[in-house]
Image: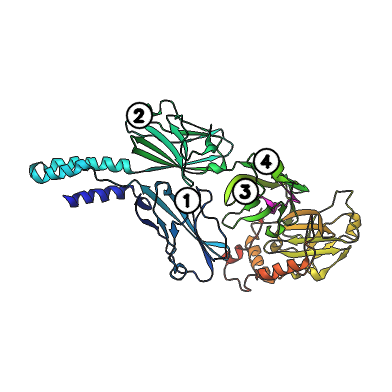
Amino acid sequence: MKMFLVFVILVHVSQHASGVVVYEGAESVLLPFHIERLPGRIKVLWSRFDLNPTTVHQFQAKEEVHVQNQLYSNRTSMSEDSLRTGNYSLTLMNPRLCDSGKYTCIIFKGGKETERRDVELQVKEPYTFPAEAAVLLLLLVLLLLGAAGAAVYLRSKLRHKLRHNYILVSEVEVKQGVWSVELPSKTKVKLTEGDTVEWSRCGPEATIHVYPDVSEPLLNQNNTYDGRTKMKVDSLKTGNLSLTLSKPHISDSGTYICTVQRGGKILTQKVVRLKVKAAQDVVEVNQWQKYFTLPFRTKAPLPEDVTVEWSRSIPEAKAMIVYVYKSGKDWPAKQHEHYRGRTKMEDDPLRSKDLSLTISYPGFRDSGTYICTVERHGNILAQEEVKLQVKSLHEVVVREWEKYFTLPFRTEDEAQQLDEGTTVEWSRYEPKDMIVHINENSEDNHGKQHEYYCGRTEMNDDPLRSKDLSLTIYHPSFSDSGTYICTVIKDGKVRERKEVQVRFKVSRKNMEENMIAVATSLPDLHIKPSESRPVPSLDQTVHQEERDQQANAAGVENLSLPSTVSSMQRAKAHVIHTTVV
């Protein structure tokens, strides 16, 4: 009969198990993650993205500083030979109810994410064998004739007990700016007037609401929730113990526990994971505008030691740092080079609480989602998300029989003086950065031009005087399709910028021949490091040596196809921006 009871318990737990299940009070629990050993220097990061800070455990070089969530301080560990064995499992000591949630392990190599694994952990109340079950077992031994009926009764009691020991977990996601959010909690347990309901938050542990209300101060009560929480008047009668939280903020993201007690004994519990996302604004700009602004005004307190970071989210890639403000100044060295010299915030933004960012000379490449994060000691104080759409990109359509095409650009700024010291640079950034044409002081400089365009480009005579900076490209081929950028530079600063999209139109009849032509013409397109040239800058001059060092460190890739094309499918892969008519 004891074997039967163990079987019942195991079957019941397996039905509810998801990921890793452990009872509160256990010495430790293991979150598994095994892969083949990764050579080289790596970093292993275990996180819970419903907490703030999100870091649970980090395995890295000793000199690297990181901020661990204090909820897990001195409670996590990994095997010392993880890098050698490929065992990146995490051991969590003394698991608690509020440790329930989704844990994500990310492995970085060379600053890039290479592996990711999610592990769901459920921490339940410790199971206690009901006292009446022991009595029933004794009766079953003495009264063998009633064994069958008693077994059915005992199984029912065990299921009832386990059902109440199983902690339900709900996920709630809401955008910042809504009036309120409800943390759901309903129970079928019959409650009485003497029962109490307590809502608390994990990491750090704090009481945020007690029902019914009490007059004396509460232990560990968090003042940030004063006047922002409420429950229905008839909660105990209806069993609806849901909590309404008004004006949810980014900092409210975390794990909440609803506990119902009677005379100091826990009747039932419910875990709710709340994630408050930044509300997304949409900004639309035209490609020819000189600048645009990503708006963000906050009411959150901004101490002097906060860090303000604007980043750009790129799918399946590491976020691009757009701008960093720290210690009362901006940090251009931390910016991605694409934005260096193009960004600016208002003076003393922490005092005005205006964290809006202005970016000059927008291009189609700037489109995307931007996130501003205000952080202090690893805690997020405020966050904003802005989606940027750059539209009205100038497009040039080239027919297959045309012998040349022109990239138009005439500056309309009458106050703009294009005189001595002005450089006009036409370039491409796809498939790699390359200089298409350079004109310095009204003289073409073919020495800095990429060899693929040598002898094929031409500008008007004295373009600085006429302000007609258009570029003509002869003998076009399909590999000329893409985005071209014209940048006007004077005294090391960007004065004007324009992008032009080139697209080819071909007939269906000649499609097969054109695809082969693309594949056989691309071998000549060898991308090499560009020679030294002025770097676009708005507020400062970036030294040429820094640009050269970055180019050399990045390395050179041969983007051409092999000279022998083995199949039509390989040729088709290199048709770029082609339209069939």
Amino acid type, mark 2:
Gly
Query: Which of the two discs, 4 and 2, labels the residue nearer the N terminus?
Result: 2
Decide which of 24, 418 is in the foreground and name it.
24
The answer to whether the residue labelled 2 contacts the one labelled 1, judged by CB atoms less than 8 Å apart, is no
Q: CA distance from mark 3 to mark 1?
A: 22 Å
Q: Residue 501's x, y, as percent?
A: 72, 54
Query: Which of the two discs, 3 and 1, labels the residue nearer the N terminus?
Result: 1
SS at circle 1: helix
Q: CA distance from mark 4 to mark 3?
A: 12 Å
Specify the segment rendered in magenta.
357-374
SS at circle 3: strand
Query: Which of the two discs, 4 and 3, labels the residue nearer the N terminus?
Result: 4
Amino acid type, mark 1:
Leu
Q: Is residue 45 magenta?
A: no
Q: Residue 80's x, y, as percent?
A: 45, 67
Q: Which mark is residue 373?
A: 3
Label 2 neighbourhood size at 10 Å, few (<14), some (14-19), many (20+)?
few
Of the two numbered discs 4 and 2 in the rendering, the one whose residue sits closer to the viewer = 2
Q: Which mark is residue 194?
A: 2
Q: Which mark is residue 297?
A: 4
Label 1 neighbourhood size at 10 Å, few (<14), some (14-19), many (20+)?
some
The answer to whether the residue labelled 4 contacts the one labelled 2, judged by CB atoms less than 8 Å apart, is no
Q: CA distance from mark 4 to mark 2?
A: 46 Å
Amino acid type, mark 4:
Arg
Query: Which of the two discs, 2 and 3, labels the residue nearer the N terminus?
Result: 2
Q: Which mark is residue 215?
A: none
Query: Which of the two discs, 1 and 4, labels the residue nearer the N terminus?
Result: 1
Q: Main secondary structure of the magenta part?
A: strand
Q: Residue 50's x, y, as percent?
A: 50, 47
Q: Which residue is mark 1?
A: 71
